[in-house]
Amino acid sequence: MVSTHPTEVQHAGTQYLPQKRNPNATISPNQELLPLTAKVNSNDCLEIGGCDVTTLVQQFGSPLYILDEDTLRAACRQYRDAFKQYYPGVSQVLYASKAWNCLAVCAIAASEGLGIDVVSGGELYTALAAGVSPEKIYLHGNNKSQPELVLAIESGVTIVVDNWYELKTLVELSTQHSALSTRIMLRLTPGIECHTHEYIRTGHLDSKFGFDPNDLDEVFTFVSKQPSLNCVGLHAHIGSQIFELQPHQDLGAVMVQWFRDTAKYGLSLTELNIGGGLGIRYTESDDPPSIEDWVKVICAAVQETCAAENLPLPKLLCEPGRSLIATSCITAYTIGATKVVPDIRTYVSVDGGMSDNPRPITYQSVYRAVVANKMSANVTETVTVAGKHCESGDILIKNAQLPKTEPGDILVVMATGAYNYSMASNYNRLPRPAAVVVANGEANLILQRETYQDLIRQDCLPERLKKSEV
Ligand code: LLP
């Protein structure tokens, strides 16, 4: 077997169990790799939410997304409670559901008092179907279609307007589709740079999102003259997977100044939405701030700037996605073929890949894995975890440090709750995996595994193409 042996012997799985770094502090889910309920049971198997992961795979099939309800709820509460603690004004946390939009996740977030940020008619429809009240739904997007805008107007959700075209379209649609004025916010591009992957930066000036700050005079003047629009506030989002606190601190201050400027146009805005973006730990070397620290810094920046400008505190909103949900989910795969390329590397293949987790191939994202049925075994191999797609780049993890594996072992990739299911595809006609939510030893299906029938559900075979064999 050709593999680089790690110099230090490590217990492959147990090293990732959640740990209290500071005995007096609550664990911030975004600083962990495994869900907060992760344990190793007497069979040396990984347990999440009181359920043995290997048993879940037997029951629900493989691959399987396993969502830990306690971890998701803990993250929701930490955001909510931190705002209560550090912000004397009104606040509202929204879950950026693009991270994972489905009925169950929307329902859990809403039951913790969170609102939902949606970015399409489909996400909006799902949030409404999950029973989320329209007053707590905010619709984003840089090119919302007319049917999406009409659905939003008729359902009474707030529309975060991104550009001139949308603004003008909305004036017409609001008059046609509602007796009431449409509740809107304006998305601005703050020009704040942050260190993250180029594709997931959105707040710098060269961005497809939001109004240019140089156009604000014109935008505010226009909006102030539209009786069909009720502009309640401003929004900005600077990017995702951010570990620094400074950009958000700057954002809070800049936005309050814009807020102040709106008064001279006769606008009486009340809401300020500073977006999402807090990073999470995907590997041991990632060191993001805690949810509490992130909220604290933003609340302080907004309060201080309001005090300096002699302004009343606005209703403060934020919309985290990744840091709310990523750590609460793991993906369990079954190991199949292994290929040793002498002197180069060993490929260990699993029964999923870039279709259920497109992040490694899209953003070169790095993940960690454990073998769920060998949690205390020592690390003995360095292998490349490959997906099963017909594409050489379909590699989930390079240089994964694992115990010796064999076909049938259950490989768990950690922190897959954000931008995995929501970005999943049917590439190579792989059915999307099932997802279960686990809590107190109980597992419930939240997304059914797709079937081959599902795969051809949208296919049409025109009559003239039938029996076309030569
Ligand atoms: N609000 C807006 C307007 C956003 O565009 C985003 C993310 C969020 C909130 C939530 O950001 P978060 O808290 O999750 O960082 N697919 C990429 C991430 C794209 C993020 C897009 N916008 C990935 O897998 O890394």
Image (tube, rainbow, N blue to C red):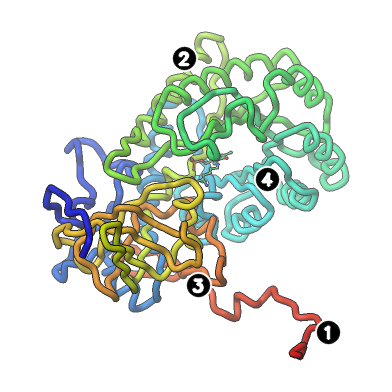
Give the residue number, with chain letter if any, for mark 1: 464
The front one of 216 and 352 is: 352
Give the residue number, with chain letter if any, for mark 4: 157
Along the horizontal axis of the image, is 206 left or right of 365? right
Along the horizontal axis of the image, is 38 left or right of 162? left
Give the residue number, with chain letter if any, for mark 2: 304
Quadrant housing residue 75: top left
Determine whether the residue tagged by mark 1 lies in a helix, strand or loop. helix
Mark toward the start of the polypeptide (1 vs 2): 2
* Amino acid type, callout 1: Arg
| Furthest residue in direction front, as rendered | 343
Q: Is residue 7 above or below residue 225?
A: below
The front one of 151 and 98 is: 98
* Amino acid type, callout 3: Gln
Circle nearer the viewer, 1 or 4: 1
Q: Marks 1/3: CA distance?
A: 34 Å
Any mark on residue 448, and which?
Answer: 3
Along the horizontal axis of the image, is 226 left or right of 269? right
Determine whether the residue tagged by mark 4 lies in a helix, strand or loop. loop
Q: Residues within 10 Å of mark 4 (few under 14, many from 20)?
A: many
Q: Position of residue 295 (x, y in %)?
A: 41, 30
Quadrant housing residue 410: bottom left
